[in-house]
Amino acid sequence: MPSTEFVVARNDLQQCKVIETQLPDAAALPDDALLVKVTRFAFTANNITYAVLGDRLKYWQLFPAPEGFGNVPVWGLGEVIASKHPAIAAGETLFGYFPMATHLVIEAADVSKRGLRDAAAHRQGVAPVYNAYTRVSGDPAFAGKQGDYQALLRPLFMLSFLVDDFLAENEFYDVKSVMLSSASSKTAYGLAHLLHARGNGIKVIGLTSAGNTSFVKSLGCYDEVVTYDNVTSLPANSAVAYVDMAGNSPLRATLHGHFGEQMKYSGIIGLTHRKSSPDEQAQVLPGAKPQFFFAPDQIRKRTKEWGPAGFGERFGAAWAGFAPNLDQWMKVSEHRGPAAVQRAYLDTLNGRVPPDQGLILSLSE
């Protein structure tokens, strides 16, 4: 059967196109395989980071594309429309990592009541979280708008949760304040919410563009909001940590130059600022050496220490405290069809999506 896919040029993310590929029909599926219709998926600046790091972190290998192109991984929901696995029925809903496509074949393995894993050979060698699917049929937390929130923010909030946990584990490097760039981004304000909720006296400072200042202030989870052109007005005589959500090299250099040895931690979380290189954290700057934060490492560490159930309980509690804000903070905007998906992709790539908007997409009309 045909599957419609949206692919991008790996060496020029501005170049993109829609293609058709052939998938096996239901009767031709191999044993234990599932044919899944991708019903809807979220697209955020975080997906641009996946594309920027596609080669380095093996994101491109998850969903093969024609030579020179890549299929950007997305978080979303899919319906099983045919199953060759005895424990999974057609009609089930799965939440997980999908291609920007109308369909996906999953080689189901490690099937449990809660989920399964895609055992396809080309998907191995990446963090396990990227091959895991949660069985969410009938779960109200994944239905309607709540499902949209899950796709848009659950993976990003997981990153927020892990950065917050990492900083707490390191006793916040004994700093007085934590600065977050791209303060209007979903990952940033998730982290700001968690930091602010700790009530430990550490100041949470949001760095943003002039155009996004009002939105960032309205969130209520930043103690101070500063525009990028005014960051050197911040007092440089007390210890700070910097969480860089965009990989903006000039801003990083300015902040390190301003704070000098008072910069106690400098973490690079995202790379949506595509003029930056993922290796630029190696450049010599005053203060703490910038380091790339790789979330799966923290997941593995905490899962080993807390156990999978303990990790899930802690994250679930954090999400329960965060989710009630979303009706106020975000407007979900749904777009269907190849042309709409392409527009949404290019708008996100070029920074044209308002910070209070969450894009839910589908390649099916």
Image: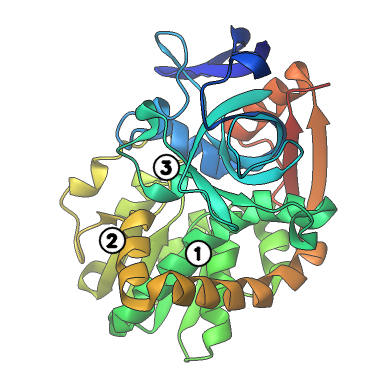
Determine contact: label 2, label 1, CB under 8 Å. no
Dividing the image into 4 quarters, which one contains the C terminus? top right
The foreground one among 33 and 312 is 33
Where disc 1 sits, the SS reads helix
- Whether residue 288 sits left or right of residue 313 in the image: it is left
* Mark 3–mark 2 distance (CA, rounded to whole Å): 18 Å
Quadrant position of residue 351: top right
- Whether residue 342 sits left or right of residue 123 in the image: it is right
Instruction: Identify which residue is drawn at 37% across, 80% down.
Output: 168
Where disc 2 sits, the SS reads helix
Give the residue pinned by disc 3. Answer: 271
The foreground one among 347 and 24 is 24
User: How packed is label 2: few (under 14 Cα within 10 Å), some, or many (20 or more)?
Assistant: many
Q: How many marks?
A: 3
Determine contact: label 1, label 3, CB under 8 Å. no
Quadrant position of residue 327: bottom right
Instruction: Identify which residue is drawn at 66% across, 78% down.
Output: 321
User: Is residue 141 visible in this depiction of the protein?
Assistant: yes
- Whether residue 104 sits left or right of residue 137 in the image: it is left
